[in-house]
Structure formats: structure tokens, C-alpha cells
Image (tube, helix red, strand yellow):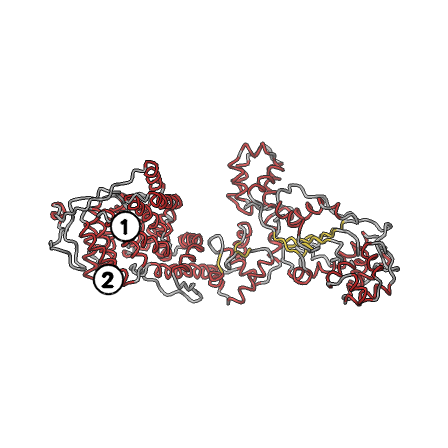
Amino acid sequence: MLKHFRLRAGLTQEELAARSGVSIRTIRGLETGARSNPRRASLRQLADALELTPHEREQLAGLGSTGASPSSTQPTPRQLPSPLPGFAGRDAELTELDGAGDSEIRVVVGAGGIGKTWLALHWANTQAARFPDGQLFVDLQGFNPDHDPLDPSTAVRGFLDALGVDAASMPTTLDGLVARYRSLVAGRRMLIVLDNAATADQVIPLLPGTPTCTVLATSRKTLTALVLRHGAYHLPLGTLDEDDAHRLLSLRLGEQRLAAEPDAVAQLIALCGRYPLALAIVAGRAQTRPRIPLAEFAAELREYGVTALDDDDPAASVPSVLSWSIRALTTAQRTVFALLGTAPGPDISLPAAITLTDLPPPRLRKVLRELEESSLIDRQPADRYSMHDLVRELAIEQAGHSLPADDREAASRRLAEFYLHTAFAGDRRLAPKRHPISLPPPRRGVVPVALPDDGVVMAWFAAEHACLLAVQRAAVTAGWDDVVWQLAWSVNRFHYRRSYLVDDIAVTELALAAAERLDDTSALVETRRLVALALARDGQPEAALDHLRQALALAEGRGRPEELANVHQMFTYVLGRAGQDQQAYRHAVQALRIYQDLRTVQWEADALNSVGWYAAKLGDFDQAWEYCQQALTLQRRLHDEDSEAVVLDSLGYIDHHLGRHADAIAHYRQSVALLRAVGDLYQLASTLEALGHPHHALNQLADAHAVWGEAIELYQAQHRNEEAERLRRHLRTDDATVPARSAKTRSRPAELAASGSALPTGSAPAPGSPPAGTPRRRATSHRRRRPPTPP
């Protein structure tokens, strides 16, 4: 103890001797144990020199000639309960407890039923040999429904009794009890386990105050005062990992029974959320009913949720154990906790929680911190908060009991509008030229997130993606059809850039059903376009075309030419993906005519690129070049990097087929740079594949294979398996295409003239005019079916 205090003061033995007037020999004897009965005067001199606190002086004085120094006549308490059955895993946490830095105080914190006591008793029993002078244990009953938290004076009396203090000589005050307790354990190597603490105030009087003792406390609350004032090591405890959850079940049920029903075991682990108490309850029930298949227990959990984990014994009931934490909450904490449970999605950001709860940010932060310290929610990086599924069920139940239905609905609607308006603003920044839908103003209390640039927009969409999908599903249940289809529209461009094909089909189909229920023609036209886009990208062109035909029938004759043009432009995209280039070209021409009549330069630029692209696909590269150059000029004037990247891709394709391979590489590389900058991974994969062909034509095989390899990786990540496999075969055979012929013709095909889509011929197309005609000849080099970006 003396050495601990001296080193803390930064003194050598010689310096302490000079400062205190106590000989070096005495100091060395005290520190090594050779001097076991020091004079009180020497101890006072040392305490003065070390500037010890009154409590530390008391500790040091306890080793004096009349103090209670360790003695072989004192009892050695062995109060540790036996380890609880079913302990599994926790290797990382056990390692942390072994180390715990330089602290003699360890605090394990986690939700009720998470396994804190299991861990503490397992570690304490395995480490008991490190504490030969005894082990003390007390259940502080911090979260017991039948008792108030144990008073510290009661706990310390129990410790003094175990240490051999006669009841008649017990001090009468808490300070006196604590002083006697600390004097008795001073210098002894003991372990003190303080289980189930409610507050730091309950624990602090039980700290031994000597570096020779180790304290292990458990609590559902973060005992901040122990960390700040006493340097405690804080160990948060979460759920088990998959392997440890399986081991827990195996310990109770045997590996043979688990191996017989692997699917049911996986379901049980998932339905219990890897929560130790939940797994233990299920395992106990299955253990006492060996003839019942595990699948039946899984079915019960699936049907009844957390109520299936209830029990007459409160200590063996997940709802009861967790509810003990909820009882300790204030009204404000309980309200926020309940509302967080109703929020769709796996977690929630602070801005979303502000809108949900309608609380000022400083007040909400305080409540969230208190809920986190109560182990009811977890704070994640970037100001996000989550809760375990079993805890969420209780929060939802709490909401049903304590919040009026109107308040719950108002909060949920605010949250839905928060996501909708933020996503809509993000989409407008990603695609400013896109013809916008109309949203009503957000209601009071809705505070959308400010998204100042494309990078922030993409990061927000990525972080909130799961929540956006969950909010749309919740809006379907609530009957908010306007939110359902508008949210699908608002996430569309993000889905396109990140190639979330499955999610896009799901949200657009929900949007279409909502638009049909609303009987809103504009919404129906828009949602059928979105469904067609999603299906086309998923390789279902015929289903996509069927939706577009219905959208075209709705759009014709409505007096809204921009709707009609958008449908034609989507026809262009879908037909191009299906390889029907000539029909795609006809729809592109019709879309361009309408956009030019409307004098909408931003949409005209995309249509010019579409016409140019399909002119190139049909073999008229001169005409294609003219239209794509016009499109590029407009895109750059509009500062639309997303669309500019697509036009540069088209120009690269034209250059390559005209034999200008170096120019093609330059255009493709400019396109790639822009696509990386805006995060359009879907288009990037196609453009990288295209870039490989002019590299190969120039015999730059290493460059070609490098970009094709990256394209394959992107295709795989986007589940575009057909495209990935096609390119793999190409790499295996190295059967690169021959540079396109440079000869060009400008003759008009008879079928185009017959369809009425042909336009007057001329020596060259005037800027902004429709194409002069459709060429006879198709490209014979690598044939890509990736059309320009849809509107």
C-alpha cells in the first residue's frame, strides 16, 4: 500500500525518506513486508509527506501496531456462489476482465438478462486462486420487483460479519462501518463481487480502498461516478455471437439434438436475438420436454414473440426481467423509450428522433443518454441509436399502454414525413433535371436534414436505407398511400446509382398499389414508369413494356406533354435493354420532339443523347456524333455531371466504332472519373466494360483486363450475374472484338419512313433538331445493350 501511494506521488524511496523524516530502511521494510509492525508516528509522518486523504490515512494507519493488520487469526471468507449453468463463450470479455488496465475496479454493464451475473461468477470462480485472503459477494438487489435496492450499510455489515467482526462491536454509522471494513481488508488480496447494483452511490461505500483488493460490480446502469472518480474499468456486455449462442444451446440440449434440427436451431437463435436469458429459457423448456421437436418451440416464438418467453418465476421471464428496468424510468424517459420502439427500421438517427419525439435537441440528448446508461438503448457511431428486438417489443407494448393513440399516430406521421422530405430533397440534388413530383409542406415538428452536396446525400441515403424501406412498409400499414408512392419516387435515383435491384422492385410495386388505391392518374403514370424501370434493370423487359403501354394509355390526351415525353423516354430505355434498338430510336425521337416543343433544355439534353446513342447502335455514327456533342454542350452548361458522364460514355462508344480508339479511351476515362465522383456504381460497371474494348484494340491487354476485372467485381456486387458471366467468358477466351469499321452511310430505312418517324433529310442536323434518319447499318464490334440513363 505504501509503495502504491509513493509511486502515485512520483517519489523514490530516498525522496520519500527525505520528505518524511522516516528512514529509508523503514520505508524499504514496509514496502517489502520485512517490517510488519510500524510505529504510528512513522505512519503519520509518511501520510503527511504523501499528502494522503483522510480515508487513505485511515487505510495506512490500519496497519499500525494497534491497528487491524492482516492476521492468520482472521477468517477467510469464501462467499462466491457456484457458477451459473449454461455459461458459454464470452472469450473476449473474459480477456478484458483479466486485463482491465491498471484498475482494481471492474464494472460489467448491460441490459437485464444479458448475462452479467453469469459472466461475473464464471470469471470470479476461475480467478479465485488469485485472491487467497478470500472472496466477498453481495446481491445489491438494484432491480428487484419485490425489494428496494439493498442499503450499503446492510451490505457492509454482511461483509464485516464474514470478516469475523462480532455483532456487538459493530459501529452504528455507515462511516464507522465502512472505516472498519476498509481497515480489515487493507493489504489483503481479496475479491469483492457486487452484483446487480442500482447506482454508484450503492457501490462506493463497499469499495475496499486498497490496491491489493479487486472489485467486480455488475449493473444495468452505467455507473459513471465509478469511472470518473475511482478509475473503474467499464465493460459493456452485448448479446452472444452466433457460435456462442449455439454453444449455450448445446450445453443444455446436447449436440446430437441440435444436429437433428439445424434449421430450427438457427431459427431459435435468430428469434431469441442471441439474448442469453431468452436462449436459456427456451433451452430449459426444451430440456424438460425431450420429445417435442425444436421446430415447435421456434414456431411458438415466431407467433407470440416476447410473451412466449414469460414465466411465473419473474427471474426466469424475459418480459419481467426487462420490465424492472422500465419501472425505474421517469415519465419523460418512458415516453421517449416507447416512441423509439415504434420507429420503423433497425435504428434511428438523432435528427429522426428529434422529429419523432418533438423534443428540443439538448433535452432529447439528455434523455437518450439516460436510456443508454440504463442499458435500454445502444448508441452507435454517427449519433444513431438502436435497441434489441426483445427490448423493442416491450417498448411497443409500453407505447400501447402509456401513449394515446392520437399521439402515437402523430409521432409516426411526423417521422414518415421526415424521411420523405429529406429523401425528396436528396433526390432533387442528385437529379436536378428530373421532373419533380409535388409534395405538400411538412407538418409542424418535421425537421428534414440539410443535405448540402452529392456526397452528403449519398451518405445519408446509405445510412438510412433500411429505415426508408421500413418506413414505406409502415406507411402501407397505416394507410398513408401518398407517402408510400412519393417515398418510392424519392429513393429511385439512389437505388439506380447503387444498383439495389431487388429493393427497387419492392418499393415501386408498393408504390403502384398505393397509386391505384388513390386513383391518382399522375401518380399511376409515374409509378408505372418506376416499376418498368425496376423490372427492366432486373432483366424482365416484357413485363416492363406492359407497364409502359398502360402508362402511355394513361398519359395520352391528358394535356400534360411532359408526362407523355417521359413515358416515351422510358420506352427508349427499356427497349434498348431488350436489344430493340430501332424501336427505341423511334421513341427517343418522339421524346425529343416534345421536349423541344416545351423548350425544356434539361430534358432535351438527355433526349439528344438518347437519339445519338441509338443512331450509333444502328450504325449512323456521323449523326450520332452530332447529337451527342449537342447533348454534351447542354449537359456542361447545366453542370449536370451525372448526365455528362453518360454522354461521354456514348461518345466513347462512337469513337471506338470509328476506329478512334485513343479518343474513345479519353472519353470513357472522363466518364469513369465523373461516375466515381457521383457514386453511380451501376453505370460505372458498364462504362468500365466498354473501356476495355479500345484498350484491347490498341493491344493494351493489361489495361483491358484490369478494367474488365473491376467491371466483373461491380457486376457481382450488384447481382448482375448474367453480365458478370458474359464478361468472364470474354476474358477466358480473350475474344475481344475488332475495331469497328469507319465507313458510314446515312440512308434512311424504309420501315422508319413507313412508321412516320422519319424526319426531313439534310446535309447535317441543325443544333437541337431531330435526327435526319435512321442508318441501315448496325455496329459489328462489341455490342452493349446498356442504354442511356432513364429520366
Q: In which quarter of the image is the N terminus?
A: bottom right
Tag 2 secondary structure: helix
Q: In the rendered image, which quarter is residue 729 located in? A: top left
Q: Quadrant of the C terminus?
A: bottom left
Compared with residue 623, is residue 404 higher up or lower down, i.e. above or below?
below
Q: Name the residue under label 1.
A: 662
Q: Which mark's residue is nearer the viewer, 1 or 2?
A: 1
Q: Where is residue 83 in the image (x, y as percent from the top left)?
A: 70, 43
Q: Which of 183 and 676 is in front in this view?
A: 676
Badge 2 amino acid: Val
Q: Which dot marks residue 430?
A: none
Q: Residues within 10 Å of mark 2 (few under 14, many from 20)?
A: some
Q: Which of 255 and 59 is in front in this view?
A: 59
Whole-Å distance between the Cαs marked 1 and 2? 31 Å
- On screen, residue 451 versus residue 555, left or right, reads right
Q: Where is residue 764 in the image (x, y as percent from the top left)?
A: 14, 56
Q: Nearer the viewer, residue 391 or 311?
A: 391
Q: Position of residue 36 (x, y in %)?
A: 86, 56
Regarding residue 751, the answer to whether it shows in the image is yes
Q: In the rendered image, which quarter is residue 565 located in? A: bottom left
Badge 1 amino acid: Ala
- Residue extending farthest to the front is 699
Q: Position of residue 202 (x, y in %)?
A: 70, 59
Q: Of the two numbered discs 1 and 2 on the same chain, state the one appearing first in sequence.
A: 2
Q: Name the residue under label 2.
A: 601
Tag 1 secondary structure: helix
What residue lies at 48% left-to-right and 52% top-to-bottom?
Answer: 346
Cβ–Cβ under 8 Å for marks 1 and 2: no
Q: How crowded is mark 1: few (under 14 residues within 10 Å), some or many (20 or more)?
A: some
Regarding residue 564, the answer to whether it shows in the image is no
